[in-house]
Amino acid sequence: GKNLDEFDEILHMPETYIVYRSFFDKIGITEEWRKVYYSLSPDEKDIAFEIIESNNFSDYHLNINNHKIIELLKHYSVKREDVRDVKTKDLNYKNTKHYFDKLIQEDNFKNLTLTYDFENEVAKVKRVASF
């Protein structure tokens, strides 16, 4: 980085955004990450940095209630494979941006909240949904 702040930014940036920096800069995803990153208060950054530095993004949503921190941490769900998949397809800018926006916004844990409370008893036993 050019200075200590820029070095700190890069240190906490998602690895995939660093490795493919020009790609993510071009489609505007890095700038979206920066907006959220710089909107955090010092206390929010402390919480986010602890998770970022642990490099464990599997269950942060269970302990975090802060919307801004969650928005920041969603960016860490983009993996190198996602970039390779897109680069092998010849997608235009808008499609590529849409693809990564969807990856970042997707809630990977929504399936964990499904319940079977409203099924009839036969469906519960057979695990067949009743409509």
Image (cartoon, helix red, strand yellow):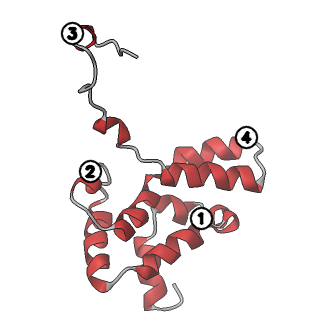
Residue 125 tag number: 3
Amino acid type at circle 2 is Asp
Question: Which residue is at 31% across, 33% downward?
Answer: 114
- Secondary structure under the numbered disc 2 in the rendered image: loop
Q: CA distance from mark 4 to mark 3?
A: 44 Å
**Residue 71 position by quadrant:** bottom left
Closer to the camera in the image, 80 or 39: 39
Neighbours of disc 1 within 10 Å: few (<14), some (14-19), many (20+): some
Amino acid type at circle 3 is Val
Closer to the camera in the image, 116 or 62: 116
- For marks 1 and 4, the one nearer the N-term is 1
Amino acid type at circle 1 is Ile
Which residue position is annotated with label 1?
A: 29
Residue 89 tag number: 4
Question: Which residue is at 46% across, 60% downward?
Answer: 75
Q: CA distance from mark 1 to mark 4?
A: 19 Å
Neighbours of disc 3 within 10 Å: few (<14), some (14-19), many (20+): few
- Secondary structure under the numbered disc 4 in the rendered image: loop
**Residue 38 position by quadrant:** bottom left
- Residue 9: image x %, image y %? 45, 79
